[in-house]
Image (spheres, rainbow, N blue to C red):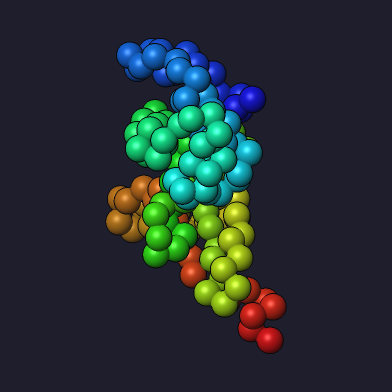
Amino acid sequence: MPGSVDWRDRLRASGHRLTAQREQVLAAVEALGHATPDEIHAYVQDAGINLSTVYRTLELLDELGLIRHAHISDRAPTYHSVTDHEHFHLVCRGCRQVISVPENRLRGLSEQVRAEHGFSVDTAHLTVFGLCGSCQK
């Protein structure tokens, strides 16, 4: 079931109820890895969860820091779990492959940006587009 973050307590502490729909949407994000709201809806629709509930639930879970979103295409945001590791995304414009890269790979750049500009980089929302090794051939 959804990750090591005590998400139930976090939900309640923020004044929200623990519902079966919220639990199922969070479980879908965990199971799918990176998924759009439509993909998450397809995963949970047999449980009678409609698309508007999926969108509202994703927004709430993102606000609470239980999931993250990134823009890895020109479509809807893609949601992913925060239970494995913080990461940023490399997206191939050729084959559309998405590669998750641990955020510590940007540590030097993040520190330099902070020192020069006083700016803290949020790598969880970072997406870098380019071509993977296979598509460069």
Whole-percent x and y of residue 20? 50, 20
Relative height, residue 137 to residue 109 (above, below): below
Whole-percent x and y of residue 87? 55, 49
Relative height, residue 27 to residue 94 (above, below): above
- Determine the residue positioned at 47% across, 25% down: 21
Whole-percent x and y of residue 72? 47, 60
Image quadrant containing the N terminus: top right
Whole-percent x and y of residue 35? 53, 48
**Residue nearest the observer in this picture, 35 or 51:** 51
Q: How many marks?
A: 0
Relative height, residue 134 to residue 53 (above, below): below
Image quadrant containing the C terminus: bottom right
**Residue nearest the observer in this picture, 78 or 82:** 78
- Determine the residue positioned at 45% across, 18% down: 19
- Determine the residue positioned at 64% across, 83% down: 136
**Residue nearest the observer in this picture, 44 or 122:** 44
- Determine the residue positioned at 48% across, 30% down: 48
